[in-house]
Amino acid sequence: MEANKIKGEAKSLVLDNGAEITYCELGTQNEEVLVSGAFFFHTFMPVMEILAQRYHVFGIVMRFDGPADIFDTDGGVHWTRQWGKDVYDFVVKMGIKKFHYFGKCHGTVPGWYLFKNHPEMLIDFCSFFLCPHLKGQDSDSWFEMARQGDIPKMMASAIRKPETGLPKKMAEAASIGNAATGPAIPKYAAHPEKIWDSLDECERDLRNATVPIGYMFGSDDPLMNDYYTSNMYIWRVTKGCHFTILNGEKHLMEIDTPERVADEALAFIDQAKKNYD
């Protein structure tokens, strides 16, 4: 169990393929389920705690090793799809039939896997600060800082109040050890489009979406602007989507203002339930 990746009580579940999944569980008094995936649940826990006031929340740690079912052409694990399958196998084993999915950045990836392969399970999908990139990449400022080895600069560029937020983020990043600078994150974590066999197939599914999707970005998020053209295209092709840009907010908004992240998610879910057709 990777209990160090969760701030608070950690639990574990062994999937049928032998992979051990670490997770946290909040809001057990609530009936309706919300699932979220992430590499770690430290700075995101305040958001989870707010969501748990309304929902039975499961936070599932996205792993970097262990048994795998889905491989890339080079023989390595196709983590974009494997993370999604892990979440699917988890909810099936837990007996969860329908749920809201909330993902932030890399945490959206399992949601996109579910959207493509198991949309009948999703009540709705909050895809915050990341979406499939149908129009390629405009720049590479975010991961360039990582390649240069300046992780503190990378993280500080994504926090509106780095003087208080950076120490928290660096402590959290340390919980994943060598994976923070390994190939899996830049190759897979920011690329939900790799779940599909082609961009045309991805766009077709978005145009025919049956799951309500809520996108949110911060205007000053370096990763948002690295994919600006794709992010400005996604709302035009996603059927019935909700699209929000918050002026002045950055990529690690959950550190600067967790209440607003949760409020935006809850507002979208409330609107999705109303069915404005």
Image (cartoon, rainbow, N blue to C red):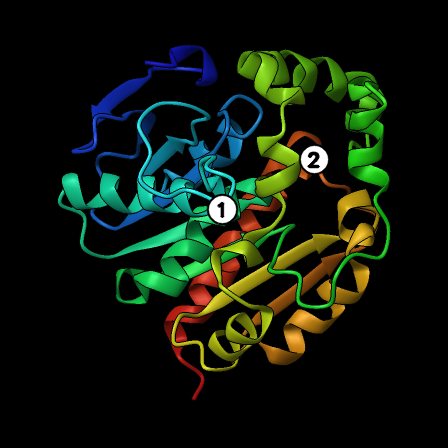
Q: In screen coordinates, is 31 left or right of 221?
A: left
Circle 2 is placed at which residue position? 252
Circle 1 is placed at which residue position? 73
- Whether residue 175 is visible: yes
Name the outermost residue toward the front.
Answer: 74
**Percent x, y of residue 23:** 33, 26
**Percent x, y of residue 145:** 84, 29
**Percent x, y of residue 162:** 82, 23
Q: Which quadrant: the N terminus?
A: top left
Label 1 environment density (alpha carbons within 10 Å; few <14, some 14–19, many ≥20): few
Determine whether 254 is above or below 156 in the image.
Answer: below
Measuring 77% from the left and 56% from the top, which residue is drawn there? 227
Q: Which quadrant: the C terminus?
A: bottom left
Label 2 environment density (alpha carbons within 10 Å; few <14, some 14–19, many ≥20): many
Callout 1: helix, strand or loop?
Answer: loop
Q: Quadrant of residue 198?
A: bottom right
Q: CA distance from mark 1 to mark 2?
A: 33 Å
